[in-house]
Image (spheres, rainbow, N blue to C red):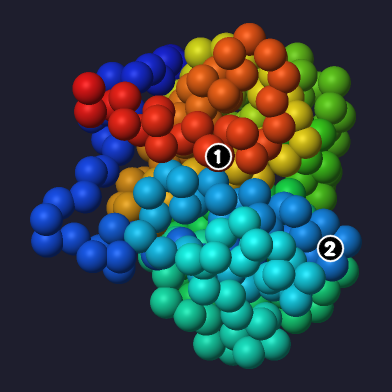
Amino acid sequence: MNTAVTWNKESVRARWPRPGATDDKYSRGVVGVIAGSEAYPGAAALVVSGAARAGAGMVRYVGPMRAQDLVLHHRPEVVVHDPGDTAETLPRAQAWVVGSGVADYPEQDAAIGSAMAAGAPLVVDAGALETVAKARAAGAREAASDRVLLTPHAGELARTLQALRHDVTIEDVSADRAGHARLLAETSRAAVLLKGSRTVIVSPGGATIELPEAPAWLATAGSGDVLAGIAGAALASGMNAAEAGACAAWVHAAAAEAASAGGPIVALDIARAVPGVLASLTS
């Protein structure tokens, strides 16, 4: 069994990119987001907020009109695209975040398929987990294993493993979180970030990274969408999938702690606190 490495502030400080005088919005990393739906438009706003607040040079959003409107209300700098126009030719992005809040929208599913086929680095959440894991397990691995990050919580991990014909329950996952994350990583040939009070990241055939215990207030609706956006910004900057996941999880937890000050928070509070956490890395 691999020995787990614990990620801390110094780990993130050593890896998180800082813009230089010659950087522009493209060199800082363009994050594409295929998330949200008519039923769950908030997921789109949360993912793009996480990516933008984490320092992406540009964020592009692909999704239905209701979600586009909410995205622009919260983040007017985001460039929006209709999925019907992008299913064949995706706009330029260094990494894509797919799956958060996606539900029953065939054109968006087609756009996710295009992102997979293009071999782009991916952060894969929620509604895209089973699709991407099954495709990669079957051999469709246009993106290298160190460029794909799956971000399930325990229930999603169990369901994804079940979709891959593993007889696994959520109780099994809870009893051996790292072991089941490793099983999904090996089967799908992708890095896996298993969310929880102590997040764990496992690469196929690689090391296991553990995060310190996160603030309990972080268990709130939409916080995982913000995490996906932060991870997308990290992946677009050029980090590998495991390091992007570990850095994003640490920043996410630190932002929650800063926003909470010991009290309850909501997901957008976490996104708003991210710039202050990143600023602390340079102090």
Vertical placement of residue 233 versus 138, above or below = above
Residue at figure coordinates x 84%, y 63% from the top left: 103
On the question of residue 113 being in view, the answer is no
User: As shown in the figure, which amino acid type bears the numbered disc 2?
Assistant: Ala
Q: Is residue 184 above or below residue 6?
A: below
Tag 1: Cα neighbours inside 10 Å, few (<14), some, or many (≥20)?
Answer: many
Quarter holding the C terminus? Answer: top left
Mark 1 or mark 2: name the one nearer the start of the chain.
2
Residue at the spot x=29%, y=58% of the render?
28
Reply above or below: 61 against 127.
below
Q: Which residue is found at the position 31% from the left and 53% from the top?
A: 238
Q: Is residue 267 above or below residue 211?
A: below
**185 sits to left or right of 216:** left
The percent position of residue 277, horizontal first and vertical second, equals: 40, 28
Query: In the image, is 167 to the left or to the right of 21?
Result: right
Answer with left or right where residue 61 lies relative to residue 153: left
- Give the residue pinned by disc 1: 271
**Residue 110 quadrant:** bottom right
- List x then y, in percent, for residue 45: 66, 55
Residue drawn at x 38%, y 17% as measured from the top left: 8
Distance from the alpha carbon under mark 1 to that under mark 2: 23 Å
Q: Which residue is mark 2?
A: 103
* Amino acid carrying mark 1 in the image: Ala
**Disc 1 or disc 2, which is closer to the eye?**
1
